[in-house]
Image (cartoon, grey):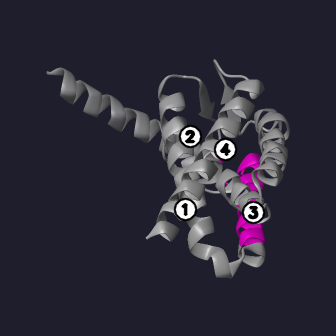
Amino acid sequence: MDTFNQFVNAAVVSSNSIYSRWATEEWFSGSWLILVGLLALSWTLLILLIDKSRLREILLFGLALTLLFGAADVIATEYGLWEYKTHIIPLKSSLFPFSYTMPPMFHMLAYQYSSSWGSFAMLATMVNVFFAFVAHPVYVWTDVLWLGNWSYIYSFLYLMSVTLGVRAFVVWLEKAEQQY
């Protein structure tokens, strides 16, 4: 059997194992219910608070964050830096609550409520401190997340660099758009 087929077979076995664990241990567990509740709360807050007159700009910022957070999440879980022990749905990657929803939404609100680099840096720091030093330890404590070769300070530094970089990109894009 060639290597490609071995990878495919291993992926199928892994998917079946993930589904089995999800159906018997994760689904409707306390940590699963916490995640679902946090997702509902995040979506509700965003829908209520987002500035609809700046929706395109704020969504661009959020989507760029989502792409970068998602890519980092896939790479990190692939190489054992961290792994999700609780999944909303039975897929290996549990990106939905962690990379595609909660962090981008709260960063979008920080972006919305800041009018300068200074105010954005302050709000982004607050959001990133919350996720790196409050949410992540709570996720570990509640068995939602396993941190392998990763630390909370790495999360903070990564989150800060990405949010500042994405804001710089969006500001640059807005200036370029205004020139034309």
Q: Earlier in the sequence, mark 1 or mark 2?
A: 2
Separation of residues labelled 4 and 3 (CA atoms)? 14 Å
Residue sitting at the far front: 179
Q: Earlier in the sequence, mark 3 or mark 2?
A: 2
Q: Secondary structure at mark 2?
A: helix
| Amino acid at the residue labelled 3 | Leu
Q: Is 43 covered by the magenta stretch?
A: yes
Separation of residues labelled 1 and 2 (CA atoms)? 49 Å
- Decide if residue 168 is on the left or right side of residue 154: left
Q: Give the number of the disc on residue 21.
A: 2
Q: Is residue 104 above or below residue 160?
A: below
Answer yes or no: is residue 88 visible: no
Query: Mark 3 = which residue?
Result: 109
- Decide if residue 108 is on the left or right side of residue 138: left
Question: Which one is in front in this view, the residue at disc 3 or the one at disc 1?
Answer: 1
Separation of residues labelled 3 and 2 (CA atoms)? 35 Å
Separation of residues labelled 3 and 1 (CA atoms)? 21 Å
Q: Is residue 10 above or below residue 47?
A: above
Query: Mark 4 = which residue?
Result: 164
